[in-house]
Amino acid sequence: MRKKIISTTCVLLGLFSSLHLCSGKFGTPITDDVSKLSELKQNIPSDYEIPVSYVPEEVAGTCWVVLNIYPLERSLEKLAGMFGAMSSNRDDINVFITMLKSLRLTFDHEELETAMQVFQCHYRERSLLSGLYFDYIQDLLRAATQGTSSFSCKPQPCLNHQQTAEGQEESRKYRWLKSSSLLLVLIPFTACIVLIVWQVRRSCSFTLQTFVIIKV
């Protein structure tokens, strides 16, 4: 009986330990494999651009990690697909994909989805140089280990890109009309100046010819 109790206790301790490693409530899935980022930075050309969708930290606030974890995961999956199955780069990238997936599972799925929908208009599409890209991953993972992520943040007002584009178009039209109006004024004015100068020169020439004739 005593052996059964000890055995059951060990099993429970094992389950608790696994929860401690996998659940955001007891720990963090971020491991020492973060050091592989430096290897990736060396193996991938510094001028190589990697596309990623993200919400800036100054906009996301405390939701920065929450809002960017899934888009970064998708970006890494696309990057991994650029390498062959036997590539060490692909293996290292898959480590971070697994790490981000484990981190994402520590959050409530519905809350995460809702937060991403609320901030949808703030997502930006950019292509980052490989060095900046891996620095971005490192910053996000570091913020995740510090436990600064939460859902208690409010989005800033959405910028209506359509209205902005229309406003820029109207501004261009206004500048063009203004320039056209200025040209319509300058052309007749310039023509008048040229005509006056031509008349003055003609009068002077005629006067000079008359004077020479009279003198002769």
Image (tube, grey):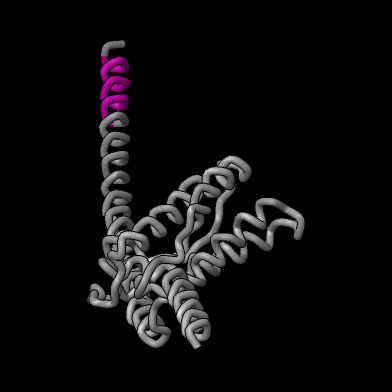
On screen, 74 above or below 211? below
Q: Residue 121 in the image: x percent, y percent?
A: 36, 75
On screen, 215 above or below 108? above
Q: Residue at x 26, y 32 (%)?
A: 200
Locate residue 195: give its quadrant: top left
Q: Quadrant of the C terminus?
A: top left
Q: Residue at x 31, y 17 (%)?
A: 213
Magenta includes 212?
yes
Locate residue 68: give its quadrant: bottom left
Magenta includes 162?
no
Q: Residue 8 in the image: x percent, y percent?
A: 49, 84
Q: Residue 36 in the image: x percent, y percent?
A: 55, 49
Residue at far front of view: 1
Which portion, as a residue range, is magenta? 203-214
In front of the other: 185 or 172:
172
In front of the other: 186 or 18:
18
Q: Residue 33 in the image: x percent, y percent?
A: 52, 53
Q: Residue at x 73, y 53 (%)?
A: 87
